[in-house]
Amino acid sequence: MKVFEKNNNIFRILSEAISEGIIVVNDDQIIVATNEAANEIFGFEEDELISEKLQILIPQEYHKNHHNHFENFVDHSGKRKMGIGRDLFGIRKNGKKFPVEVGLNPFVIYDNNYVMALVSDITLRKEQEKQIYELNTELERKIEKRTEELHCTITELEEEIKLRKEAEAITKESLKKERDLNELKTKFLSLVSHEFKTPLSGILTSAALIGKYTQFEQQSKRDKHLDTIKNKVKYLDNILNDFLSIERLETGKVTYKFNSFPLSKVVNEVVYNANMLLKDGQRISYPDDIDDYIIDFDEKILELTLSNLIHNAVKYSGENSVVDLQVSFEDDMFTFKIIDQGIGIPEKEQEFIFKRYFRAENALLDQGTGIGLNIVKSHLENLGGSITFTSTEGQGSTFTVQIPVANNSK
């Protein structure tokens, strides 16, 4: 150990020139030399650590494992840092534990093995690392909070955008409805002007001509013009009834009256009235085997439905054509089919056929208001029924009506 004694100028010069603490131990982990820096780090006086066990500088809780670490180091000696991957601690003379960084350097002098430990007090660094960690943690917390606040803000903005879009959609829909309403008003005024003007002109003409036939033998001519007036008045009355039906449907004032009645009663009346409108060579094919059917439904609505469909079939079919009325009963539903050989409905316009005031391009020259099918559809749906159709332009149409039947027998 004389090589490490105080009066050894070589060790003293070398050790005191180094800022790190130097501790030299032998194979038995006995401290054989220290420098001034090491003494200051651990709080000992000069030479106070000489001949002490190395464990005096190691916290009690690490004593057990330290012996094995030291032997392992000696068996695999080489310059390296101690405690890579874990925190190391030393203990001062006053018992205070503090973090250290240790570099180990084995060497041999006069066939004796020694280990030199270069010790640095890293308390300040650890405090700074702790501060940096806390600052980073706080920064992450603030970032997380700001991110959450930003997310909430984005969510609120998205909700506001959604509400604005909904409001915009409602506004657009309102504007569209307003435009549609104005369009309907325009169509209505045009319709009323046209549909009322034509029959009124006929009534005035017939009324004027009647006055010219004053002779008794001209009674047949007077009767002809009286029939014209009656038909025109009836036509106007039907239009007014349609308009009243629309008003009642829109305001919810419509009421339905159910009663039991023979199906043939309504069918016979509808077909009889339609026969008065037939063109040359036209005929209506009457359904078979309906005399015994008793139906529980609103009689006026059924009559309105069949009259509208059969009159349309007659109006839009040519001379020498057949309008076929079919009736069947199945699964508590009556099914009516009105099949014609008329002008049909253009495919591009079929989706609008039940729209109020709509009239297909190929039907504009015929009299009509474009509200009959709309009224029929509304009544049937209110009563749990339905109306559908198939049509081919130039070949004809088939309208199918289904109504539920509460009471029937055959």
Image (cartoon, rainbow, N blue to C red):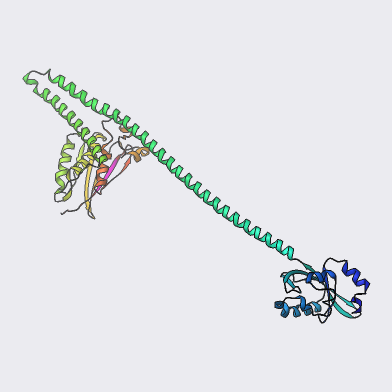
41 w.r.t. 233: above or below: below
Residue 345 place in picture, x, y as percent: 32, 38
Q: Tell me if 169 is positioned left or right of 329 in this view.
A: right
| Depth check, front residue: 228 or 314 | 228
What residue do we see at 79% from left, 77% from top?
Answer: 73
Q: In which quarter of the image is the N terminus?
A: bottom right
Residue 65 place in picture, x, y as percent: 72, 79
Magenta stretch: helix, strand or loop mostly: strand
| Depth check, front residue: 98 or 235 | 98
342 w.r.t. 39: above or below: above
What residue do we see at 71% from left, 78% from top?
Answer: 60
* Residue 200 is one of the magenta-drawn residues: no
| Depth check, front residue: 32 or 269 | 32
Which range is magenta? Answer: 397-402
Residue 282 visible in the current orientation: yes
133 w.r.t. 377: above or below: below
370 w.r.t. 260: above or below: above
Residue 320 visible in the current orientation: no
Residue 22 place in picture, x, y as percent: 83, 71
Residue placed furthest toward the bottom: 28
Quadrant hosting residue 179: top left
Q: Tell me if 136 is positioned left or right of 273 in this view.
A: right
| Depth check, front residue: 87 or 363 | 87
Exactly how many numbered labels are in the figure? 0
Quadrant hosting residue 119: bottom right
* Residue 399 is one of the magenta-drawn residues: yes
Q: Quadrant of the C terminus?
A: bottom left
